[in-house]
Structures are given as structure tokens and as C-alpha cells.
Amino acid sequence: MPEPVRLGLALPQFGRFAGAWALVTVAREAEAEGFDSLWVGDRLMTPLAPKDRYPGGDGTIPPAHRTFLDPFAVMATAAAVTTRIRLGSSALNANWYAPALLARSLATIDQLSGGRLDVGLGLGWSSEEYAAVGASWQGRAARLDATLDALETIWRDDPVVLTGEQWTIPPSHIFPKPAQLPRPPVYLAGFAPPALDRIGRRADGWLAASMPISVLTGMWKIVKEAAERKGRDPDALRIVMRANPIIVDSPADAALPRSGTVRQIADHLSAAAESGVHEIFLDLQHTAQGPRHLLDLAGELRQASGL
């Protein structure tokens, strides 16, 4: 039998939800109510006149993203107030962080949570955020591959040795190692063919977004074909899909899963599950009025979708 589809929530992190009370309330209640996972995102700033188009909607950066809590601190806090529910990132902008620091932060969270971390990494979309952290926008795909290599080495080896163009580590002890050995699951985001190919070649799964099912399955086919070419088992890979809908009272265009009634969004979630998605998490921070409303909406969507 196929495994049941897992259902998670995005942790309170931005806009009106960017505070300790909302974060702790949702983390604890989500675990108590039987959700499977909690997820964070990664945003740094909102340029007043952005050079790059925000991916999704009309291309405008959501005003709520002007306040965005640090993802590592949010995951660590959630780890401290829960015991069972898994913690994930969708997605950390991998190239903003030196691999040795990224490896240490993620291994620490995995240890503090008792081995409950799912590592999700991506490239990001804002060249201005790259400039703000001193990371090169050019060559970012090659840097992501090098970061993945470095994380594998740092988490696996003792002593650790890295010699390369970007980072050098002399023979050194680097601890802690992750609680999950040899490493936590690593998921990658992306929608362009090279990104999908990378997922198939070297990740444990794909961080997808809510989109028309035919588009989703077409992209997943590219991932699985890349895995087969690499000699990997494509059926061992997983899809984790983010859904960040705006809930409305009157039916919206059913072809646009970004907005709709509870029934419409639930139907889309059900269709995604039937198409092969392994895990769905709901980011309701753009539509809920507060933590209790967020949890209530999540419960309605879970019941209506049958997940």
C-alpha cells in the first residue's frame, strides 16, 4: 500500500505572526492535533524598488514579508517546545551561508530536536539579497553543488578536510554531527530543468509549490528521469509541496490554487495527493488573522481534503 500523505504547517514566522507567542502556540498545538511537520522559510529584506520579480502572484513582494524571523532560531524554538513533530526548511537560501556554519547550525537543530530535521535548500530569487550578504549572484548553481558536497563531507567525516576554490578546512574536528546518520534528509527547491535534474541526481526529494497538477507531474517526471540516469531509485524520492492559499468565501477560478474556498483548496490538495505528492504543508499566514484562526483553517482543510 502507498504511504499515507503527510500533512504539515508553516511555522509562524512573518508579518503579524512574527512573534514568540504565535510560534510557540502553533508549534505545540500542531503537534497536539496530529500534524506531521512544521516548516520555515528564508527571507532577509524587502527592497523598496526590487530589481527582481517575486515568484508568484503578480510579482509583488508580499507586505507581510517586511518582518521575517530567522529560520534557524524559529526551528530551534519549535524543537524546544515539541517532542514528535518533524521540522523542515522550505527553503533555506543555501548560498547565503558558509557551508561550515550551515552544517553546524543544521546539525545543532537536528541534535536538539532528537533527529527530527528535514533540510530543505534552494537558490533564492533575489539578487539584491545576495548582494546584502556578500554572496555572488553569478555562478550560484555551481556554488549550491559545492555547498552540498561540503555539507556531506562535514557531516560524515572526522577529521574534516576541504580543499577548494571557495572554502578550505585543514584537518579538523567539526562537531556536532547530525543525530540522523549519515545525515538528515536533504530536499531541494527549484522549477527550471537544471534544478529538477539536480534534485534527481543528488537530493532525497523535491520542495514543490502548489501549481496545476499537470505542471506538477510534468516536473516530477523530469526529476525521476534524472534519478534513473544517475542509477538512483526514483521511487525512493519524495515530493513535499508548499500550499499557501488565500481562503475566500466565494468560489474562485478552480485553475488557480493560490486562492479559493476551503472546498476548492481542499480539492486541490486531494488531487495533489492522488498525483503522487508525499507531503503537503499549509502556509496560512497570508490568510489567517491569528494563531487560533490559522489552526482552525488548517483543521478545516485537513477534514475537507481527507488528508
Image: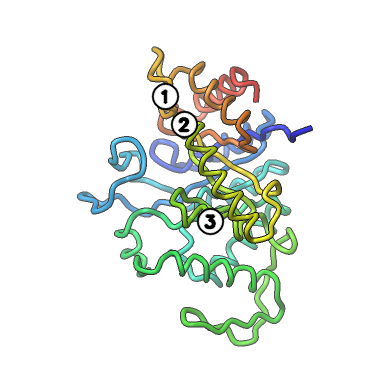
Of tags 3 and 1, which is closer to the observer? Answer: 3
Determine the residue located farthest toward the bottom in the rendered image. 170
The crowding category of the residue bearing disc 2, from other C-alpha atoms within 10 Å (few below 14, some 14 to 19, many at least 20), is some
Residue drawn at 71 percent across, 49 percent down: 236
Residues at discs 2 and 3 in contact (Cβ within 8 Å): no
Element type at mark 2: loop
Answer with mark 2 or mark 3, whichever residue precedes in sequence. Answer: 3
Residue under label 1, please give it. 255
Amino acid type at circle 1 is Ala
Residue under label 3, please give it. 197
Residue drawn at 67 percent across, 72 percent down: 175
The crowding category of the residue bearing disc 1, from other C-alpha atoms within 10 Å (few below 14, some 14 to 19, many at least 20), is few
- Residue 153 image position (x, y, % from top left): 64, 73
Residue under label 2, please give it. 212
Query: For this rendering, which residue is in front, 191 or 123?
Result: 191
Amino acid type at circle 3 is Asp
